[in-house]
Amino acid sequence: MKWTEELASFAAERKFEDLPPEVVQQVKLTVLDTLGCGLGGYTLAAEEVSWILSLIKNQGCSGPSTVFCDGFKTSSAYAALANGTMIHTVDFDDTHVGSVGHLGSSLVATAFAMGEQLKSRGTDVITAFTLGFEVAARVGRSVMPTHYNFWHPTATVGLIGSAVAGAKLLGLDAERMELVIGHAADQTGGLRYCIDSGDFSKSLHPGFAAMKGVLLSLVVSMGATGPKGILEYPTGFCNAYSAEPKLEPLTADLGKDYEVMQDTTKAYPAIQCAQAPVQATLSVMRKHNLRAEDIEQIDIRRADFPAAATKNQGCNYSPATPLAAHLSIPFCVGLAAYEGRVGLDQFTHDKLKSPRIKEVMSKIKITPDPKINTEYPNARTAVFVDVKVKGGRAYSESVIHAKGEPDNRMTPDEVRDKFRGLASNTFDHGRVEVIIEAIRDLEKVEDFSKTTHILVK
């Protein structure tokens, strides 16, 4: 079967009018949430953001596309690089659990940069995002879980999705869409070292995915040839990037179910596998009016995700940087137990050094439990948390589907409130509400280049 060809044809031929209303609604909420991470990251991760902005400014390249917040104009490729990186600095953006990828970061960066350059309609931007997400998520499913042993899907399949989004905005036909997928699969990279270390390479992954997606879609639009059938080829993407590739997810129920409906919006600024432990710990502490000094031990039993690389994922007991702390279940649960909340402002070097938070972290035990997988096969991040306190008492809480997951979605109002909390670090209340309204009515936009000014300070 020609898997790549079929997937490319779907992406090239599907129109905005074909998208169900609930998919359009979910895309707009995901775009808003993703933008919030970028607008908040501009201020909250100012040092990291300055590195990428300085790099791009020093290239001396002017162009039609806007860099968020700072507002300087550059090429669509450089704007995508800057914005994709900015979005992922605070690690609060969406997670598609089936591919273990933060797909919104690179897709928003690509769609906004190219949409502005091409003066696209809002419906075009929504469609490009939807189909880029669809292809990226399906390719991710086809190579998981062993893909995650070495690779960071945000970078790998994120590039493929970004290239598809760019090609869709350019109006490329099915044959050229397949070439774009081929080039993107050929150019992909991004190791999962960053998950363990929490270094800046993690933030760069969606930025470079977005930049390459822009460039590859453009070069094919200019007539470049390239590889076909790359996903199923014996030495192609799926076989090269997975020990156990499964090609069926590439096209199963294509057009019936949309992968963006399986996306997760994070309730806490932490790695996805920390969402349920944090939620359960906060619930126990509040419900029973516990204090951190009461705790003798916190036992976390979690679903055993079947990939060697994830056996100890999130189990960093000594994070060295704020980004590493976002990726540490012990640190995030320690915050929840000691301070009663988990917010972006708490991920600081001072908190990392706090002896009281470290003391709570030392009492946390994390154990994979295959029985959870058996009982809840569709709940990959489910946890059971037992908090043992002095005097022998113990309190338990389970979270099968963390807040924000498809089976426990945030309401539209909750997503907007999250956006307000993030964006208000950089913009005043009036501007924040203008952006919310603009994304709510995104399908009404006739010229996207006349919209992006609202994202500038």
Image (cartoon, rainbow, N blue to C red):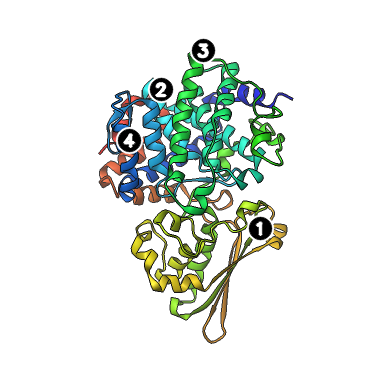
Q: Earlier in the sequence, mark 4 or mark 3?
A: 4
Question: Could you tell whether 299 is left or right of 105 in the image?
Answer: right
Could one spot residue 287 in this view of the protein? yes
Disc 1 on helix, strand or loop? Answer: loop
Mark 1, other Cα within 10 Å: few <14 / some 14–19 / many ≥20: many
Q: Label 2 amino acid?
A: Ser
Q: Nearer the viewer, mark 3 or mark 2?
A: 3
Residue 223: numbered disc: 3
Question: Could you tell whether 166 is left or right of 48 in the image?
Answer: right
Mark 2, other Cα within 10 Å: few <14 / some 14–19 / many ≥20: many
Q: Earlier in the sequence, mark 4 or mark 2?
A: 4
Q: Measuring 51% from the left and 22% from the top, which residue is drawn there?
A: 167
Disc 4 on helix, strand or loop? Answer: helix
| Depth order, front residue of 228/289 | 228
| Depth order, front residue of 312/37 | 312
Is there CB contact under 8 Å for labels 4 and 2? Answer: no
Residue 304: numbered disc: 1
Q: How far, Cα to Cα, is label 4 from label 1?
A: 41 Å
Q: Nearer the viewer, mark 4 or mark 2?
A: 4
Q: How far, Cα to Cα, is label 4 from label 3?
A: 30 Å
Could one spot residue 423 in this view of the protein? no
Disc 2 on helix, strand or loop? Answer: loop
Mark 2, residue position: 120
Mark 4, other Cα within 10 Å: few <14 / some 14–19 / many ≥20: few
Q: Earlier in the sequence, mark 3 or mark 1?
A: 3
Q: Is residue 41 above or below residue 343?
A: above
Residue 367's quadrant in the figure? bottom right
Residue 55: numbered disc: 4
